[in-house]
Image: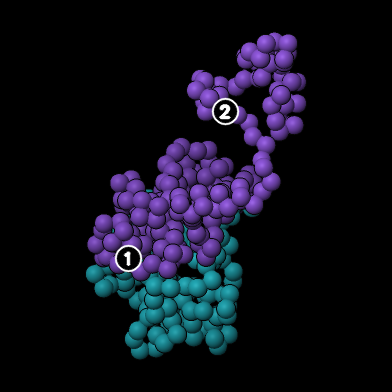
Chain colours: A cyan, B purple
Amino acid sequence: MPQGARRADMDTFLKAMVKKREWEFPDIDTLKGKGMQGLTELRWKAEGAPHRIFGYRLTENEYVCLIGCTHNAKKYTPPDAMKTARTRRHDIQTGAAIYREYKLLTSL
Amino acid sequence: MNINSSLVSEMKDKQYRDAYVASQIRIGLPMQTRALRKSRDWSQPELAEYAGMAQPRISEIEKPGERRLNIETLLRLASAFDVALQVRFVPFSEFIDFSEDIDLDNFALDTFEEEVAAAEERERLQAPPQRFISPASQGKPNGLFLVAKADDHNQRKQPTSDDGEELRNAASCGSTR
């Protein structure tokens, strides 16, 4: 799948999500597992490949994206995506890492 | 469309441009479908029944990127919602404006019958409207006509370049002469 198509699908999905007041399944789901409490995944499919962004809601209007991955046959690529998400959330919460706003492409 | 915007800048890449159009169908239409269903307070099984599809198929249709939506499927959904489906080629400026402005939280469309009822209600509440009489409604061929002056024996004539002022005046007055 061309890189441009992946980018465009992600951009379109995220822009739609940003405008929505309530996020709901199947666009978002909770992550289960040890140390995953409070983490969610944004979900969409691009050319047959399920794409995910792991993250968590910081405030009512802010969502922190920790890592992006694909999900096929119950396996994530990269395979340590969940561990990375846990680590990054911990780093942010302890001040060891910072986050910055992701600039969506706009027509303005 | 702002040509200096980040989106337009990205779209100068042909590959991204094409992908942006496709993504509005793959990602945008499923979200529109779900928003429209929810605006009617319909469940997935209800929409499935109205569209003559199975509920799992509706579930897949509403997931961003899950299915390749073909025109036939979209027509069935449009019929179920009793709304029109517009498929046409448009310039990017128009496409971008629509895609970027759509508000899924408030995405609701009237059915044909609701539109007609609303139009009839508006008409009922208004003072007797001034109307142009369509040539077609009088059994005459379609076209743009000016109504001739009385001394022209009420015959219709095609507008000429000299009639431009007359035409503009007639239009701005909101009535024929």
Q: Which mark is residue B26?
A: none
At x 27%, y 65%, the residue is B55
Nearer the camera: disc 1 or disc 2 = 2
Q: Position of residue B59 (x, y in %)?
A: 31, 65
Instruction: Answer yes or no: is residue A50 visible.
Output: no
* Amino acid type assigned to the residue bearing label 1 in the image: Glu
Answer left or right for B70 relative to A89.
Answer: left
User: Please, what secondary structure does the residue beneath circle 2 have?
Assistant: loop
Residue B112 vs B131, above or below: the answer is below
Answer left or right for B149 relative to B108.
Answer: right
At x 34%, y 86%, the residue is A33
Q: Which mark is residue B46?
A: 1
Q: Position of residue B36 (x, y in %)?
A: 44, 60
* Amino acid type assigned to the residue bearing label 2 in the image: Ser
Q: Position of residue B21 (x, y in %)?
A: 45, 47
Q: Position of residue A67 (x, y in %)?
A: 44, 72
At x 35%, y 76%, the residue is A80
Label 2: chain?
B
Cα distance, mark 1 to mark 2?
42 Å
Residue B174 vs B31, above or below: the answer is above
Answer with the quarter of the image where residue B38 lies.
bottom left
At x 67%, y 37%, the residue is B130
User: Please, what secondary structure does the residue beneath circle 1 have?
Assistant: helix
User: Which one is nearer the viewer's eye here, B165 or A87?
Assistant: B165
Answer with the quarter of the image where residue B170 lies.
top right
User: Which one is nearer the viewer's eye here, B18 or B43?
Assistant: B43
Instruction: Check disc 2 and report the residue beneath it.
Output: B134
Please determine if labels 1 and 2 lie on a single subunit.
Answer: yes
Answer left or right for B72 relative to B125.
Answer: left
Label 1: chain?
B
